[in-house]
Image: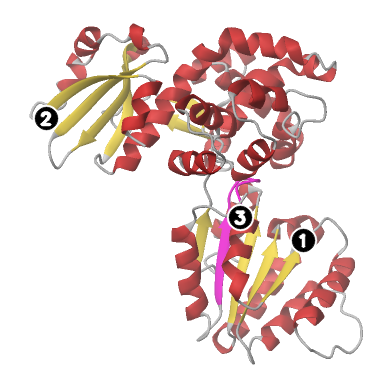
Amino acid sequence: MKFYDRDSELNALLKLYGQSKEDAKMSVLTGRRRVGKTLLSLEFVRNHKFVYLFVSKKSESLLCIEYLEEIRRVFDVPVIGEIRKFKDIFSLLLEISTKESFTLIIDEFQEFFHINKAVYSEMQHLWDLNKNRCRLNLILIGSIYSLMHKIFQNAKEPLFQRADRIFFIKPFTIKYINQILGDYGINDLKTLFDYYVFTGGIPRYIDILVTNSASSYNHILDFILEANSPFLNEGKNLLIEEFGKEYGMYFSILELISAGKTARTEIESILERNIGGYLDRLEKDYSIISKHKPINAKPNSRLQKYFITDNFLNFWFRFLYRNYSAIETKNFNYIKILLKRDYLTYCGRILEKFYHELFANTGKYNRIGSYWEKGNQNEIDLVAVNDMKKEIVIAEIKMNPSKINTGVLKQKSQRLLASYPEYRPKWIGLSLKDAVNYL
């Protein structure tokens, strides 16, 4: 699959590269695995001199042997004796950059936390001493969100405030998923939505599916639910290292949220324990869930729901992890039957999210959210507000358009509109077929 999107990130990186010719610059690329951080960095340096170092899970001395070979491949530098510490590798690269400008990419940078934590303080010391005399464009890439957040945004860590820019790389928007599918000859809205449901815009997942000719819902499902599919264990592969030994509790919470248990009280009543700390870490440390409040709620309102932000993980916990016994016995047909039964209901919430993103991308509204009252009364799927023009759009979103009733929607919105007395309201119904007007 060719390279798509990332224009704003590439432009920002190019600007930092230009600045690095005066004094060294440090950029951080973070985000969940498979989102395309490495591909972005390599696309950026396609026409620049660069050194790429990958931090694999091996001893520091073996890494240094590997790194030295890579440096010698790019630069003609004499090295006397053995280098067994990364600080000496980094010092060598800083010295080279005093003579010529280049980009250094260090991928899976967070792995030094497990290999030798002292690397971070050693790098900080060398960086502070040499930054102003070097012409190095340093790009640090990390996949484990909690560790990268700790390394660069915890005031107690040595590299705190050393990065000139921190980029949180996000999945592709619906616009780019649609563009990719179009390039592969797939042009129907249903398949676009199914790709959104199953991949959430993660570039690697889209690449796997399109290169394996998964051009419809059934093709996608057949590929995901087959022996040795890369998707079957993906949730575990992504998250167990993040969560550590407490992953079982985190997985239980995420399974319940994916099944529609979105209130803290609901989850606690099932698990029979206080989960406030877990929810807080899932939201703030791991960035896996988000907390939603009604669009007109006050900041201290306790009326809130939790949702998994990543569509793929939501699907994985709802249908794969929840039915892992069937996967282990290779009874994939059982899960397909479940999906056939539950898919439309499951997709109702995803279609709401789909339209929230589409409305956000129009640039017409400064606030977009949903609305409900205590006890989940008078739920409204989408509320889009333009405070400058004093306009408010109130939408009911259904997979089945025959179930949309704008009359009932007007009744449900009475208390909401009391908060917007001078605004012009517009009530609309949206199903998947209407998405063509927003793409």
The answer to whether residue 132 is left or right of residue 252 is left
Question: Colour mode?
Answer: secondary structure
Q: Is residue 115 above or below residue 105?
A: above
The quadrant in which residue 411 appears is: top left
Q: Secondary structure at mark 1?
A: loop
In the picture as drawn, the residue positioned furthest to the right comes out as 81
Task: Give the alpha-carbon distance from disc 3 to disc 2, as whole Å.
Answer: 42 Å
Q: Which residue is located at x 91 percent, y 81 percent?
A: 82
Q: Which residue is located at x 35 percent, y 12 percent?
A: 401
Amino acid at circle 2: Tyr
Magenta region includes residue 26: yes
- What residue sits right under mark 3 in the picture? 37
- What residue sits right under mark 2 in the picture? 423
Q: Which numbered marker is on residue 275? A: none
Which image quadrant: the C terminus?
top left
In the picture as drawn, the residue positioned furthest to the front comes out as 185
Picture coordinates of residue 340, whole percent (x, y): 61, 10
Which of disc 2 and disc 3 is earlier in sequence? 3
Question: Between tags 1 and 3, which lies in front?
Answer: 3
Is residue 333 shown to the viewer in this render?
yes
Q: Which residues are magenta?
A: 25-37
The answer to whether residue 172 is left or right of residue 413 is right
Residue neighbourhood size for the residue with mark 3, other residues' Cα within 10 Å, grouped as few (<14), some (14–19), many (≥20) = many
Residue in the foreground of this view, choosing between 371 and 146? 371
Residue in the foreground of this view, choosing between 163 and 140? 140
Residue neighbourhood size for the residue with mark 1, other residues' Cα within 10 Å, grouped as few (<14), some (14–19), many (≥20) = some
The quadrant in which residue 100 appears is: bottom right
- What residue sits right under mark 1 in the picture? 55
The answer to whether residue 87 is left or right of residue 2 is right
Residue in the foreground of this view, choosing between 346 and 1? 1
